[in-house]
Amino acid sequence: MDREPDRGQYAISYFTSPEAERPANFFPLPNAIFHIGLSTGAIAVYSYLMYCEDRKSHQCWPSYKVIGKAVGMSENTVRKYVHELWYKELIQIEPSKHELGGQIRNGNLQYKILPIQRAIDNYNEGQLWK
């Protein structure tokens, strides 16, 4: 017996003009991300960070474990690709802390998505020296 899958959460609504309001279940991914020498794993991690990003503050704070589960990687592999994104100046990383039972403990890293133009400029400059 065939059943139609529940598409409520993933329903796609198309807009017909640039002035139309964009649907809430999309996130922007710059086209240039495919032209600045990133590995496929780094693109996957960057995409997930963009998905989690607060559009006003450009920040998010998923753990390596959460990112890994979403993109099908181990925590150590996610750590490697996060470092690649930081090195390419696509993200900033800041540690966070929280208080639990009167003790201060380390929290998840806080990521800030940076404007992609800096990464493009760095990539192009590197190409000039090859």
Image (cartoon, grey):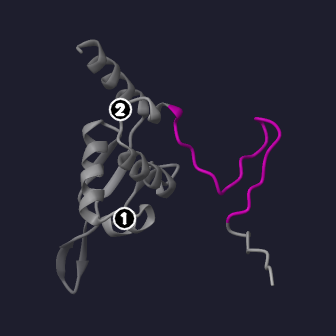
Q: CA distance from mark 2 to mark 1?
A: 22 Å
Residue 70 is situated, as x and y percent measured from the top left of the image, at 44, 65
Q: Quadrant of the C terminus?
A: top left
Residue 92 is situated, as x and y percent measured from the top left of the image, at 30, 45
- The one of 7 and 92 positioned closer to us in this rendering: 7
Name the kind of residue labelled 1 in the image. Answer: Gly
Q: Is residue 54 magenta?
A: no
Furthest residue toward left: 103
Asked if residue 102 lies left or right of residue 62, the reply is left
For the stretch drawn in magenta, the main secondary structure is loop
Name the kind of residue labelled 2 in the image. Answer: Gly
Magenta segment boundaries in residue numbering: 10-31
Q: Quadrant of residue 89?
A: top left
Q: Which residue is mark 1?
A: 68
Q: Which residue is mark 2?
A: 37
Q: Quadrant of residue 74?
A: bottom left
